[in-house]
């Protein structure tokens, strides 16, 4: 995942790609890194999805603009619109199934 640290860079990447993942993490979030690794692993099966990481603790303005108040939070945008939001207790299998469904419709 590519790290982003400005609201403009997040917005630009969301608007420039058909499918975009924005993953909000935090320094004090123990599960964030483990979940990130698993998300990166299954995203390898979806080469057209662009994935970005935002540290919500260091970039609170970005987090607030996306209504992220606890980490981790996974957001999937399709053609600029938020389509999936999941956080805290992430069901990775269900998440991957949802992504797969959208991916197969678009590509």
Image (cartoon, helix red, strand yellow):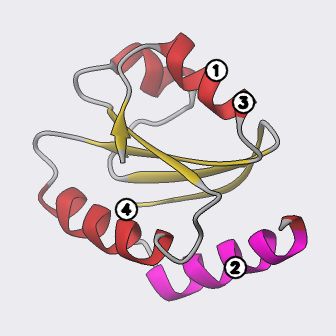
Alpha-carbon span between mark 3 and mark 1: 6 Å
Q: Which residue is mark 1?
A: 12
Of the numbered discs in the image, which one, if any, rests on residue 16?
3
Q: Is residue 100 magenta?
A: yes
| N-terminal label among 4 and 1 | 1
Alpha-carbon span between mark 2 and mark 3: 20 Å
Element type at mark 1? helix
Q: Which residue is mark 2?
A: 100
Q: Nearer the viewer, residue 2 or 70?
A: 2
Q: Dot 3, how many residues are within 10 Å of its Cα: few (below 14), some (14-19), or many (20+)? A: few
Of the numbered discs in the image, which one, if any, rests on residue 88?
4
Image marks 3 and 1: residues in contact by CB distance under 8 Å: yes
Alpha-carbon span between mark 4 and mark 1: 26 Å
The residue drawn where x is 22% and y is 40% is: 26
The residue drawn where x is 44% and y is 27% is: 63
- Left or right of residue 101, residue 42 in this image: left
Alpha-carbon span between mark 4 and mark 3: 28 Å
Image location (x, y in percent) of residue 2? 36, 39
Image location (x, y in percent) of residue 27? 12, 39
């Amino acid at each position: 995942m590519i790290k982003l640290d400005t609201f403009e860079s997040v917005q630009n990447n969301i608007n420039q790609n058909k499918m975009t993942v924005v993953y909000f993490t935090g320094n004090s979030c123990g599960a964030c890194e483990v979940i990130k690794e698993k998300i990166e692993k299954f995203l390898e099966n979806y080469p057209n999805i662009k994935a970005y990481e935002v540290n919500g603790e260091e970039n609170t303005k970005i987090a607030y603009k996306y209504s992220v108040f606890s980490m981790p939070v996974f957001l999937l945008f399709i053609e600029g619109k938020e389509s999936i939001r999941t956080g805290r207790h992430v069901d990775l299998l269900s998440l991957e199934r949802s992504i797969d469904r959208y991916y197969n419709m678009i590509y």
